[in-house]
Image: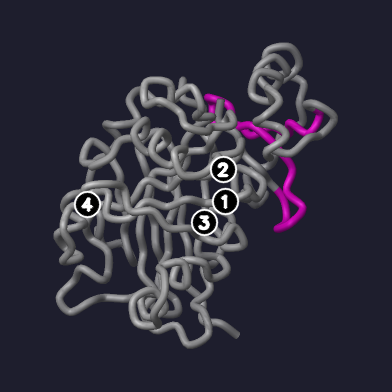
Amino acid sequence: MKLIRFGEPGRERPGLMLPDGRRIDASGVGGGADYDEAFFGSGGLERLARWLADTGAAAPVVADDVRLGPPICRPSKIVCVGLNYRDHARESGMAVPDEPVLFFKATTAITGPNDDVIIPRDGTKVDWEVELALVIGRRATYVERDRALDHVAGYMLHNDYSERSFQLERGGQWVKGKSCDTFAPLGPFLATPDEIRDVHDLRIWLKVNGESRQCSSTCELIFDVPTLVSYISQFMTLLPGDIISTGTPPGVGLGHTPPRYLVDGDEVELGIEGLGSARQRLRACR
């Protein structure tokens, strides 16, 4: 299944994208429950599948011009992985890590896949990072690697925007440069694992103003999905609906010589094979 949320910001409703591209309203599932921790943690995906098979054909159709929001409701946390593509570590001038590099991104940064991205006040070095993100479907604590995929509800596209001056020049942790409002566009949809032929062999790409900037494959991940779920669960409990963003391939603005950052009016387009594409316009903070 491909889960979507649609409607005005803050008033999104749950839906599904069908194989033929049609979008339907799934508000009737489980009394209108949203795609949140309670939904994923209580067998929501199974209920949704049964509803789709039994009554999905009669569900209201969502018009193509209706805004798509982030595919899941705001989770308890976004755990990000840094330097998880070998080439990206090299372009950043950093050694390939021996263990996953973890940092947090504020959940208030979450926005829809095609919403404008706002350059923060005093921001001068906004950068792009196309990433594969996964959503936890079952509570995960001290999970063994060979059971890790049992805890994954699905996968989605994430653009992990960064304000490099906040991240690298203001002291402290990376989270300051990662958490500005609108810095986590998600979607267009959350694909359940059965929709993806091989999560570790997907083309991943990003363009800025029509020019290719990132083009790689998830086969280049240093730490794969089962490793990340297992590893992170050794340090914290992962709740249903939590997001793990698995890192970005080479080609970010920071890696250019000289660095190339985003400005008001720039357009970023990105996608991952099987997970759709998204487009964001950069806007200056008003």
Label 4 – label 1 distance at C-alpha: 23 Å
Number of marks in picture = 4
149 and 207: which one is in front?
149
Mark 3 / mark 2, whichever is N-terminal = 3
Q: For marks 3 and 2, give the CA distance.
A: 15 Å
Residues at badges 4 and 2 in contact (C-beta under 8 Å)?
Answer: no
Residue 139 x %, y %: 59, 31
Give whichever of 144, 150 is nearer the camera. 144
Q: Are marks 2 and 1 in contact (CB under 8 Å)?
A: yes
Q: Give the residue type that dot 1 points to.
A: Lys
Mark 2 or mark 1: which comes first in sequence?
Answer: 1
**Mark 4 — residue?**
97
**Which circle marks residue 185 in the picture?**
3
Residue at image coords 44%, 72%: 177
Q: In which quadrant of the rendered image does the C terminus lie?
A: bottom right
Q: Secondary structure at mark 4?
A: loop
User: What's the CA distance linking mark 4 and mark 2?
Assistant: 24 Å
Front: mark 4 or 2: 4
Question: In this rendering, is residue 263 above or below 49?
Answer: below
Q: What amino acid type should be assigned to the residue bearing mark 2?
A: Asp
Q: Earlier in the sequence, mark 3 or mark 1?
A: 1
Which-is-in-front pick, marks 3 and 4? 4
The amino acid pointed to by label 3 is Pro
Give the residue pinned by disc 2. Answer: 242
Image quadrant for the N terminus?
top right
Q: Residues within 10 Å of mark 4 (few under 14, many from 20)?
A: some
When asked about the image quadrant of residue 137, the answer is top right
> What x and y, as percent, mark residue 178?
46, 66
Residue drawn at (44%, 76%), measured in percent from left and top?
265
Residue behind mark 1: 77
